[in-house]
Image: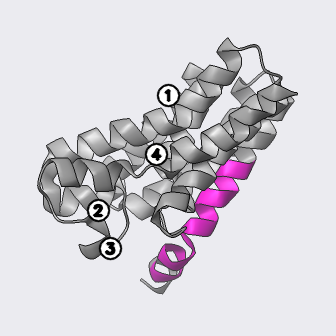
Amino acid sequence: MWMWLLVPVGYLIGSVSAAIIICRCLRLPDPRDQGSGNPGATNVLRYGGKKAAGLTLFADLLKGAIPVVMGIALGASDEIVAAAGAAAFLGHVFPVFYGFKGGKGVSTGCGAFFGFDFFFGLSVFGSWVVLAKINRISSLSSVITACLSPLYAYLILESPTYVVGSVFISVGVLMTHRSNIQRLLAG
């Protein structure tokens, strides 16, 4: 029963904003006050450069992976592991430490995917990279990748519970991109 504590731990880990902390450490402006106002790697890239964005991306991936890997290492059930990954995603999107106003959750969700299965995470991440190189629009790449992720989950993951967790995160990414989707549809 105590293993369910991994879920709030995942949420708290997800609630730590890598973008804000990294920008503060590198003496860059707060990402919430720049560009899109989103505390994520893409926005940090726009004004902080590749180094700051790369650190943010890596830290956000870790935020998603750590609770999942902890759960697996402790022998938690698939339900707890999937819930911990989903909680990290929710923590990034609705961070308790920042007034419940966070990022879009793409990197943190992908980090959870890496934790579920390395090849699954690599497939999702690789799809995003290829799409971003082709269309040069981060939000479009994220939306398409979120749509592909449940298919990858179904084909790659052995645990039906991880598939459900992956679908939850993918739907969450689509929901955080609602305004981006409207702008993309409007041209």
**Tag 3: amino acid:** Ser
Which of the two labelled residues, at mark 4 and mark 3, occupies the earlier sequence position?
3
Label 1: element kind:
helix
**Tag 4: amino acid:** Ser
Q: Main secondary structure of the magenta part?
A: helix
Q: Which mark is residue 122?
A: 1
Q: What range of the chain is rendered magenta?
A: 168-183
Q: Are marks 3 and 2 in contact (CB under 8 Å)?
A: yes
In depth, the one of 134 and 36 nearer the eye is: 36
Mark closer to the observer (2, 1): 2
Q: Position of residue 90 (x, y in %)?
A: 62, 54
In depth, the one of 183 and 107 nearer the eye is: 107
Q: Are marks 2 and 4 in contact (CB under 8 Å)?
A: no
Quarter of the figure that contains the N terminus: top right
**Tag 2: amino acid:** Asn
Q: Which mark is residue 36?
A: 3
Label 2: element kind:
helix
Where 178 sits versus 168, above or below? below
**Tag 1: amino acid:** Leu
Mark closer to the observer (4, 1): 4
Q: Position of residue 94 (x, y in %)?
A: 57, 62
Q: Which mark is residue 131?
A: none
- Taking the spot 63% from the left edge, 28% from the top edge, the residue there is 68
Is residue 172 inside the magenta stretch? yes
Q: Which mark is residue 107?
A: 4
What residue is pinned by disc 2?
43
Q: Position of residue 117 (x, y in %)?
A: 62, 22
Is residue 160 toward the left or the right of residue 81 in the image? right
How far apart marks 2 and 4 lie (CA) works out to 13 Å
Residue 43 occupies which quadrant of the picture?
bottom left
